[in-house]
Amino acid sequence: MTAAGLSAVAVAHASLLNPVLSRTPTETARLTNAVPKPVAQPAAEDVLIAFEEPVPGRAIVSPFGLRQLPWEGNGRLHEGVDISADLGVPVIAVADGVIVEAGTKGGYGRFVAIRHAERLTTYYAHLGSIDANLKPGMTVKGGDPIGRIGSTGTSTGPHLHFEIRDAQKRPLDPSMFLGKAFAEAGDLPLDKAKRYSGRVRMAYVSFIPESKRALMDAKNNPSVVVIKRTTTDAQDLAEAERNLKGAQARAAAQAPKVDGLRELSIGPDGRPRAQLAL
Ligand SMILES: [Zn+2]
């Protein structure tokens, strides 16, 4: 019970002990004002939502935006940020909210999602462990531990993949929110944070997952489109084989969701839409 609650009970008892006591409105106001206020939560009334860093003090090693992984033929949207940290380092809820998911989710591995003010949702992926008492429906405060750093799901090493989604589940650039407080909904940079440059960054990856080795090999031996050439049957066969490999690699690149990456670079005509910075 809060201090204010205790005082209110004390005032109620005083009234019971003095049933004949009648107070003027002024006296009542004075007594009410005398009740100590609860210890103020820091600027709670002035702030709609304040974002902490999910792994305090650890840097973002891979930002939000178009990114190409070494085994991919083209760029895709990295829908969040990667924060590097050692296995077992605690991960915290970035803001007050309600747990909406806690479990395993495809390429995200061990995964937690938290719903916040203005229906913003934060995602925490590749966790090594999720706090045992964390259940959907439970409320958390910003700074509460939710799990620990791992490398579960489609991950190239221990890190946190962190996302912020808007009310329509569109990915937002987390760097525009982390470490910042917003007084009202209109202050949230929702439109700005949805945008990203058309430039594709080549991602540096220290470890190629076993499942991506075949794609890597296919990429290092790309098929060659020959416009006009006199060929032998053996050469045509070899060419067909190389093209088949390319088609397989493209199909494989389109199939899975990798580390929160959304396929967006291959258009309906089967050609890459994004300009590659090779
Ligand atoms: Zn990521």
Image (cartoon, grey):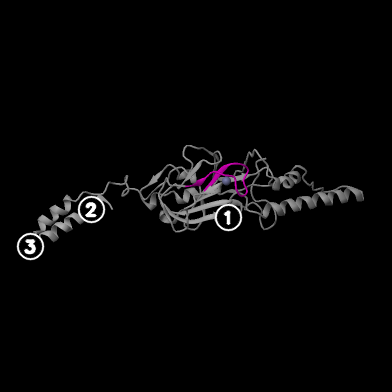
- Say which quarter of the image contains residue 115: bottom left
Q: Position of residue 54 (x, y in %)?
A: 48, 44
Span of residues in magenta:
146-162
Residue type, numbered disc 3: Val
Q: How many marks?
A: 3
Q: Position of residue 235 (x, y in %)?
A: 89, 48
Q: Position of residue 163 (x, y in %)?
A: 52, 49
Disc 3/disc 2 C-alpha distance (Å): 23 Å
- Indicate whether residue 160 is drawn in magenta: yes
Q: Report the mark closest to the observer, 3 or 1.
A: 3
State the mark number for residue 105: 1
Disc 3/disc 1 C-alpha distance (Å): 65 Å
Disc 2/disc 1 C-alpha distance (Å): 45 Å
Q: Residue at x 47, y 37 (%)?
A: 57
| Residue on which the image places disc 2 | 6
Q: Is mark 3 within 8 Å of ligand 1?
A: no
Residue type, numbered disc 2: Leu
Looking at the image, residue 195 sits to the left or right of residue 153; the answer is left
Sequence-earlier tag: 2 or 1:
2
14 or 200, which is in the foreground? 14
From the viewer's perspective, is residue 38 above or below residue 202?
below
Which SS class for mark 1? Answer: loop
Q: Residue at x 14, y 53 (%)?
A: 31
